[in-house]
Image: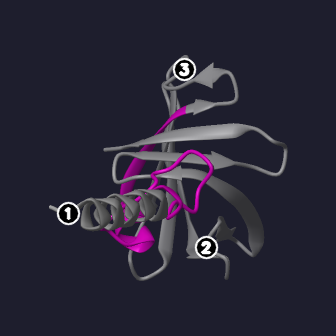
Amino acid sequence: MKPIQRNLFLAAAVVTVLNFQSCGKYEDGPGFSLRSKTSRLTGEWEVVRIGTTSFPSNGYSVEFEFEKSGDFSQTVTESGYGSYSYTGDWEFASDKENLEIIIDGDLSIFEIKRLTNKELWLEDDYNQEWRLEAK
């Protein structure tokens, strides 16, 4: 390979790598994904931490389910009391950096910090980080 061709190839490689690194919309990644945001979010998630509290905690657990159709459910389980569920709807905000969940007319907005097919990190209006793992 001639020096000029090598330099052009190297420059193209650097530009490609930098473009892939800047593809990430969320603060904590991923930098690049072949799966759509909807397909990464759709499914069942277990809350493993809210702020500094790890879950399950003292027999208390929380699970979310996001359906592709926009349906949402939250199941809370408390030992000794059983489980109860809330249902509603979810959608991405227009910028797809925020997740909007509506239950009984109440809107909760979470900033998405990380969205992979195995991890979901959200920040609520009180600056508490929610960490969820795919079930």
Q: Which residues are magenta?
A: 21-48
Q: Residues within 10 Å of mark 1 (few under 14, many from 20)?
A: few
Which residue is at the front of the view, 91 or 94? 94
- Residue for badge 3: 57
Q: Amino acid at mark 2?
A: Lys
Q: Earlier in the sequence, mark 2 or mark 1?
A: 1
Q: Quadrant of residue 126?
A: top right
The vertical placement of 69 against 86, above or below, is below
- Secondary structure under tag 2 reads loop
Give the x, y percent position of residue 2.
Answer: 20, 63
Q: Nearer the viewer, mark 3 or mark 1?
A: 1
User: In the drawing, does residue 78 fall left or right of residue 122?
Assistant: left
Q: Is residue 8 magenta?
A: no
Q: Which mark is residue 96?
A: 2
Q: How far separated are the C-alphas under marks 3 and 2?
A: 31 Å
**SS under mark 1:** loop
